[in-house]
């Protein structure tokens, strides 16, 4: 009869698909129906839905960023090579100015939403991936481990080291609870959210404005990969409203990414202060410093008790007329019954004149 464990008289056994004498799941397939993994790592799946830009259903925002409004964002287009070179790391830098002045990360578990990277590599255990903030503080989100686990869909052919594969989306979030990459190693690491090897709180105290870096080091020979883009999403409480996709803001002149009022000028039209401190004014001279432009000075009698007093006069020219004395008091030159400053002014106005001139 049929031997124990066999499924026919020829001694065949059931394969993993339940076929007697079958060869099991075909090479490249992911199940017995011949399906393959789609770009989202789903066996027999349809991949990214039309109109969406990733496996989580996100769409492109106005800046072409998948899934929203990340301010810290770098796109390498066809991909940045992670070389199989143990003497150097790949470092991507981005200078950020879009946050409020003096904004810092107080509690990274709240202030940082996630670090995102789209990449592929044929040996996860080669890599150390580090996020470095502007003051040099850093957090390692992956530190080797995971052995030959694939990231995305790499071109794992030694004779084609410069051919990019297909990057998959990976996130590291402070609140993730499903383990780090190495904890999920084996086969191909599915696209999704993972824990960081080091806590994001390593970045507490980091300034948000300045040069951010992502460093990827390949520490073992024989495999390489490509980074296609990365981003860091933070709490929007720190953000200055941007006016373009580069994170620029409006300057004081309303120009997106502009440098504001030019040094030496006083407004956005290129005007300068005149001698009276008026922006765009045309006064060239104020010799006596009375804040009246010389070409607008009015000459005349500036003493209010004079018969010919001119209330519009800005410079007294000594032509005041005071008339007859109205008092028997010789010192009461103004005739108001009191000896005061008015009398001194009258005296000074007539000082050094002959009586025939009065």
Image (cartoon, rainbow, N blue to C red):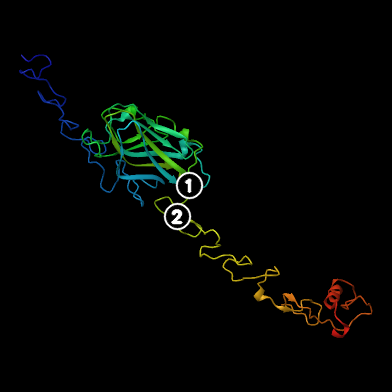
User: Which of the 4 image quarters holds residue 181?
Assistant: top left
Nearer the N terminus, badge 1 or badge 2?
Answer: 1
**264 displayed left or right of 62:** right
Dot 1: what SS? loop
The residue that appears at 9% across and 14% down in the rendered structure is 3
Q: Position of residue 134 (x, y in %)?
A: 47, 40
Label 1, label 2: how far apart the Cα atoms are: 13 Å
Residue 8 higher or lower than 105, as above or below: above
Q: Which mark is residue 99?
A: 1
The residue that appears at 12% across and 26% down in the rendered structure is 23
Q: Position of residue 300 (x, y in %)?
A: 74, 79
Residue located farthest toward the right when viewing the structure as drawn: 328
User: Which of the 4 image quarters holds residue 40?
Assistant: top left
Q: Which residue is mark 2?
A: 257
**300 displayed left or right of 198:** right
Quadrant of the snapshot with the N terminus: top left
């Amino acid at each position: 009869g049929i031997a124990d464990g066999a499924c026919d008289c020829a001694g065949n056994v059931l394969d993993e698909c339940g076929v007697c004498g079958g060869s099991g799941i075909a090479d490249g397939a992911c199940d017995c129906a011949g399906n393959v993994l789609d770009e989202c790592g789903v066996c027999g799946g349809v991949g990214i839905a039309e109109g969406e830009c990733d496996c989580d259903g996100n769409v492109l925002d106005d800046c072409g960023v998948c899934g929203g409004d990340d301010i810290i964002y770098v796109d390498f287009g066809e991909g940045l090579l992670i070389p199989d070179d143990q003497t150097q790391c790949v470092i991507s830098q981005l200078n950020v100015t879009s946050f409020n002045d003096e904004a810092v990360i107080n509690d990274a578990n709240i202030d940082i939403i996630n670090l995102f990277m789209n990449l592929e590599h044929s040996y996860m255990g080669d890599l150390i991936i580090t996020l470095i903030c502007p003051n040099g503080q850093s957090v390692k989100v992956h530190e080797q481990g995971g052995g030959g686990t694939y990231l995305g869909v790499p071109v794992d052919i030694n004779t084609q080291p410069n051919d990019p594969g297909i990057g998959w989306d990976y996130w590291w979030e402070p609140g993730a609870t499903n383990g780090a990459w190495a904890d999920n190693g084996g086969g191909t690491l599915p696209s999704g959210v993972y824990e960081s090897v080091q806590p994001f709180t390593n970045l507490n105290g980091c300034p948000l404005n300045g040069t951010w870096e992502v460093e990827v080091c390949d520490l073992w020979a024989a495999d390489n990969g490509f980074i296609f883009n990365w981003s860091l999403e933070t709490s929007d409480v720190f953000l200055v409203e941007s006016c373009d996709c580069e994170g620029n803001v409006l300057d004081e002149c309303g120009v997106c990414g502009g440098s504001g009022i030019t040094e030496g000028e006083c407004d956005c039209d290129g005007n300068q202060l005149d001698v009276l401190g008026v922006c765009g004014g045309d006064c060239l001279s104020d010799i006596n410093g009375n804040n009246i432009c010389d070409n607008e000075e009015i000459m005349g009698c500036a003493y209010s008790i004079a018969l010919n007093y001119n209330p519009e006069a800005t410079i007294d020219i000594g032509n005041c007329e005071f008339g007859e004395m109205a008092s028997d008091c010789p010192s009461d030159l103004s005739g108001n019954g009191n000896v005061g400053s008015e009398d001194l002014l009258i005296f000074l106005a007539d000082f050094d004149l002959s009586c025939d001139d009065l």
